[in-house]
Each structure stands twice: as structure tokens, then as C-alpha cells.
């Protein structure tokens, strides 16, 4: 059974919320951050590589007309 994804405006909103995305510098994490930001959330990116986190945060902030922020986090 194939599920049809809901459009961003279908009763869900992240407006006024803060979302922390672990592994947000690339791949699924970065796409999750983009989606949350598009739905109005303030987004904090984390990742192991500080240069990639900073680049992703800058890109995310610039694409939404705001500043981006990120921090290095090592788990393990």
C-alpha cells in the first residue's frame, strides 16, 4: 500500500517551534531541516563536521531570509 504524503499546509505547522536536527549537515537530516524551516520552525543543526554544519546552516538561513546556526556534536 502506497501512502500519499500530506502537503505542508494539511493541518501541520512548526510555526513558533524549535527543531533540533541531528545529522543536519547533509542527506535526510538536511532535507528534514529544510522542511521544518519551510513550515515556520527555528532550526538548530548538529553534526560531526563543523565546516559542513556551518555551510548547511548558512545555506538554510540564506534560503529562508534569516541567519543560520549550527553546532558540532559527537555522539559515541
Image: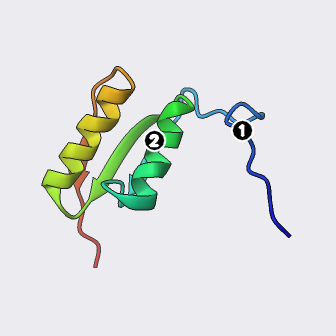
Between 31 and 76, the one nearer to me in the picture = 31
Q: Quadrant of residue 56?
A: top left
| SS class, disc 2 | helix
Instruction: Tell me, yes or no, if residue 76 can be seen here.
Output: yes
Give the image location of residue 62, x and y in percent. Answer: 29, 27
Who's the residue at 28% across and 37% down the image? 59
Who's the residue at 45% across and 41% down the image? 34
Q: In this view, does 13 lie above or below 35?
A: above
Colour style of the rendered protein structure: rainbow
Q: Is residue 22 above or below residue 5?
A: below
2 or 1: tag closer to the N-terminus: 1
| SS class, disc 1 | loop
Q: In which quarter of the image is residue 61?
A: top left
Local crowd at mark 2 within 10 Å, few (<14), some, or many (≥20)?
A: many
Who's the residue at 44% across and 45% down the image? 33
Task: Write down the residue under mark 2.
Answer: 34
Q: Quadrant of residue 54?
A: top left
Between 42 and 1, the one nearer to me in the picture = 1
Give the image location of residue 21, x and y in percent. Answer: 42, 53
- Residue 7 bears which disc, if any? 1
16 lies left or right of 23 = right
Instruction: Tell me, yes or no, if residue 41 can be seen here.
Output: no
Q: Which residue lies furthest to the right in this view?
A: 1
24 lies left or right of 73 = right
Give the image location of residue 16, x and y in percent. Answer: 54, 27
Amino acid at each position: 500500500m502506497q501512502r500519499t504524503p500530506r502537503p505542508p499546509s494539511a493541518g501541520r505547522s512548526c510555526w513558533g517551534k524549535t527543531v533540533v536536527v541531528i545529522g543536519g549537515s547533509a542527506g535526510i537530516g538536511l532535507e528534514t531541516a529544510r522542511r521544518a524551516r519551510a513550515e515556520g520552525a527555528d532550526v538548530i543543526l548538529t553534526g560531526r563536521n563543523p565546516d559542513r554544519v556551518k555551510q548547511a546552516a548558512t545555506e538554510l538561513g540564506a534560503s529562508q531570509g534569516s541567519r543560520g546556526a549550527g553546532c558540532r556534536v559527537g555522539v559515541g
